[in-house]
Amino acid sequence: MNGKKYFHVIVAFSLLLLTPAVHATNLVLNGSFETPVAADCTNGAAVCRNNGVDTTWVQSQNMGGWIIGASSVDLFNETFTTAADGNQWVELNGDYGANGSIYQDISTIIGQKYLLQFSMTGQFANGISYGPNGDKTASVFWGSYLVDNIMLPVTDCGTQYACGQSTAVYPDTMVWQFFQYEVTAISDTTRLQFADNMPWATAHGMGLDNVSLTEVSSVPLPGAFWLMGLGLSGLAAIRRSRHAPSRNSAG
């Protein structure tokens, strides 16, 4: 094995030791909102409600592990429009005129880092201007810490109605955007909360789906690994010294 090969082995070994590891267990319950089973809204939420089928979950209710924190939210499935993961998703404004929110209180380890991931979408509704640029807005909280204020463009309207009509429209295929953040626990229980914060609360808020929270850690470095690394470094040094030209060689 030549010096270059020794060098490549040492670099690869070092990178392996320093590679962060994500523990795959999702600490969020029902992160894709697959339970309870949502109402069949093939012809839209308004049709559901007119036929006596309610898609709305209200404050303090437990929606498959998620608690409704403020006002209300809507739970939809793919008979309505596409989810980011699985068959169901949540809209963060259920009723007109009030911002909705949902949360979970999660057991955490003080000082532990976590990877928070989720998908959001700004859905079309009435052609109304929502945020400063006609966008949808929502906030993400980790305990009392504001993780982010998210602003997304309103999705193009689908085939049920023409854009700009008074009846709310959800597109046939939603455009979902993926987000991820690293957060750290400062208590043994941390509240993960998603809240709609549009200045003009309507019945058409931000869409949320595919929520996960996983522990993040570094690969442990046992003493044997360090000794192996030092051994490889020593072998490389010996190899280099054997190939070094002698200064006493005749010219």
Image (spheres, rainbow, N blue to C red):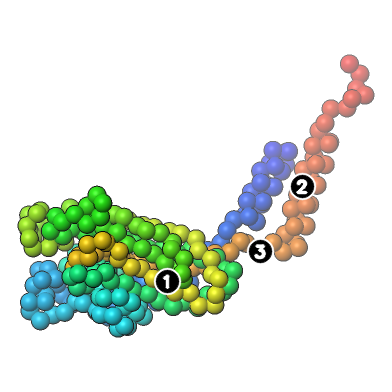
Q: Position of residue 64 (x, y in %)?
A: 33, 80
Q: Position of residue 137 (x, y in %)?
A: 29, 59
Left or right: residue 96 versus residue 32 is: left
- What is the x, y in percent for residue 83? 26, 65
Could you tell me which residue is drawn at 81 percent across and 33 percent down? Answer: 243
Label 3 SS: loop
In the visual, does 123 lie left or right of 162? right
Instruction: Please tell me which residue lies in front, 187 or 112.
Output: 187
Rendered residue at 67%/51% (across/down): 14
User: Which sits earlier in the primary sequence, circle 2 or circle 3?
Assistant: 3
Q: Nearer the viewer, mark 2 or mark 3?
A: 3
Label 2 Cα crowd, 10 Å radius (few <14 / some 14-19 / many 20+): some
Callout 1 amino acid: Leu
Alpha carbon separation for disc pair 1 and 3: 28 Å
| Residue identified by numbered label 1 | 192
Query: Is residue 213 visible in this depiction of the protein?
Result: no
> Badge 3 is on which residue?
220
Please give the residue where the numbered disc 2 appears in the rendered image: 233
CB atoms of marks 1 and 3 within 8 Å: no
Tell me where residue 248 sits by quadrant: top right
Which dot, 1 or 3, sits closer to the camera? 1
Give, as a three-letter code, the residue at label 2.
Answer: Ser
Task: Kindly identify which numbered label has been placed on residue 76.
Answer: none
Badge 2 marks a residue whose secondary structure is helix
The quadrant holding residue 88 is: bottom left
